[in-house]
Image (cartoon, helix red, strand yellow):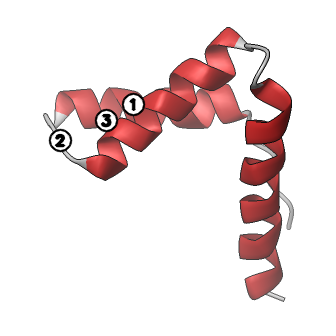
Amino acid sequence: MILDISAVLLFGAASAFAVKTKSAGGGAALVLFLFGFFAAGTGAYEPIHEVVQACADALSDLGN
């Protein structure tokens, strides 16, 4: 079964959770950065998107 989720939706939900639980740390900072990045669609979109896509591909290959 394949499930496609928008990166903006995923990081938005994670950001809302991090703010709600008042998480402080590197993980929360990374989640908030990635949400802002994907939402803004800046000029740095392509290189960061490629890194995130490579990580997602690597994680999906672990299950196979």
Q: Are there few (<14), some (14-19), or many (20+) residues within 10 Å of tag 2?
A: few
**Is residue 43 shown left or right of residue 25?**
right
Q: Amino acid at mark 2?
A: Ser
Residue placed under numbered mark 1 in the picture: 15
Q: Amino acid at mark 1?
A: Ser
Q: In front here: 43 or 37?
A: 43
Q: In front here: 46 or 16?
A: 46
Mark 2 secondary-structure assignment? loop
Q: Residue at x 28, y 36 (%)?
A: 18
Q: Is residue 40 above or below residue 63?
A: above
Residue placed under numbered mark 3 in the picture: 17
Q: CA distance from mark 3 to mark 2?
A: 8 Å
Q: CA distance from mark 1 to mark 3?
A: 5 Å
In the rendered view of the protein, which quadrant contains the C terminus?
A: bottom right
The answer to whether the residues at label 3 and label 2 have Cβ atoms under 8 Å apart is yes
Q: Earlier in the sequence, mark 3 or mark 2?
A: 3
Q: Is residue 50 above or below residue 64?
A: above
Q: Earlier in the sequence, mark 1 or mark 2?
A: 1
Q: Which mark is residue 23?
A: 2
**Is residue 47 shown left or right of residue 15?**
right
Which of labels 3 and 2 is toward the front?
A: 2
**Is residue 59 shown left or right of residue 37?**
right
Mark 1 secondary-structure assignment? helix
